[in-house]
């Protein structure tokens, strides 16, 4: 019984602990293409402070803006994708390109219709000019203009 108890104690001490399992999987991931990149980014923090100032027996609040830059470090982990994941991404990319191609064709057709808009100012000016020319070229209008010049020519 003592030997069995000692054997179980030795197995529990030398068995794979969670740290060893994690280390094993981490090494395996690095071997398969895991990349850990330490990145840093600068963040600007602005603070607004206000304090009272007494001028001419009145209290005026002055604003004071301060900025501080802080550097934040973080780890970016690049996990390589499996063949299955790349295959699914490729299929999705092809589907989206087909959908975008169809929608581009439809929008191009719609834009082409908008391209031929009628300029209504030109139509209105042409209508008014035609109306005025019809009035001027009328025989009664010409005879009245002749009478007008004869009348003023006699005076």
Image (spheres, rainbow, N blue to C red):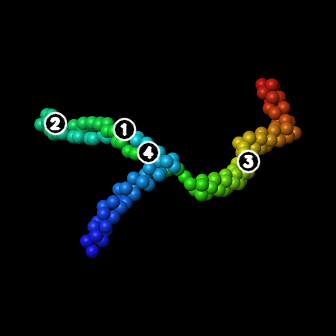
Q: Secondary structure at mark 2?
A: strand
Which residue does the numbered mark 1 point to in the structure image?
42
Which residue does the numbered mark 3 point to in the structure image?
112
User: Disc 1 and disc 4: Cα gap in Å?
Assistant: 20 Å
Q: Please say if the residues under marks 3 and 1 sit with CB atoms less than 8 Å apart.
A: no
Q: Name the spot of residue 133 as percent of width and height, x first.
A: 81, 39
Which numbered disc flags the more N-terminal residue, 4 or 3? 4
User: Disc 2 and disc 4: Cα gap in Å?
Assistant: 53 Å
Q: Name the spot of residue 148 as percent of width and height, x first.
A: 80, 32
Nearest the eye: 9 or 65: 9
User: Disc 3 and disc 1: Cα gap in Å?
Assistant: 48 Å
Which residue does the numbered mark 2 point to in the structure image?
53
Which residue does the numbered mark 4 point to in the structure image?
36
Mark nearer the viewer, 2 or 4? 4
Work out whether 97 lies above or below 1: above
Q: Which mark is residue 72?
A: none
Mark nearer the viewer, 1 or 2? 1
Q: Name the spot of residue 67 as percent of width and height, x first.
A: 29, 36
Which numbered disc flags the more N-terminal residue, 1 or 4? 4
- Please tell me which residue is depicted at 67% across the width and 53% down the height of the picture: 94
Q: Secondary structure at mark 1?
A: strand
User: Disc 4 and disc 3: Cα gap in Å?
Assistant: 51 Å
């Amino acid at each position: 019984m003592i030997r069995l108890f000692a054997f179980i104690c030795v197995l529990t001490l030398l068995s794979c602990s969670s740290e060893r399992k994690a280390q094993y999987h981490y090494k395996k991931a690095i071997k398969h293409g895991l990349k850990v990149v330490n990145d840093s980014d600068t963040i600007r923090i602005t603070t607004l402070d206000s304090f009272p100032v007494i001028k001419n027996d009145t209290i005026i609040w002055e604003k004071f803006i301060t900025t501080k830059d802080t550097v934040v470090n973080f780890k970016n982990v690049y996990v390589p994708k499996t063949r299955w994941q790349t295959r699914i991404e490729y299929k999705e990319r092809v589907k989206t390109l087909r959908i975008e191609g169809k929608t581009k064709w439809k929008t191009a057709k719609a834009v082409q219709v908008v391209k031929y808009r009628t300029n209504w100012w030109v139509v209105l000016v042409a209508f008014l000019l035609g109306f005025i020319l019809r009035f001027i070229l009328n025989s009664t209008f010409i005879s009245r203009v002749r009478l007008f010049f004869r009348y003023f020519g006699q005076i």
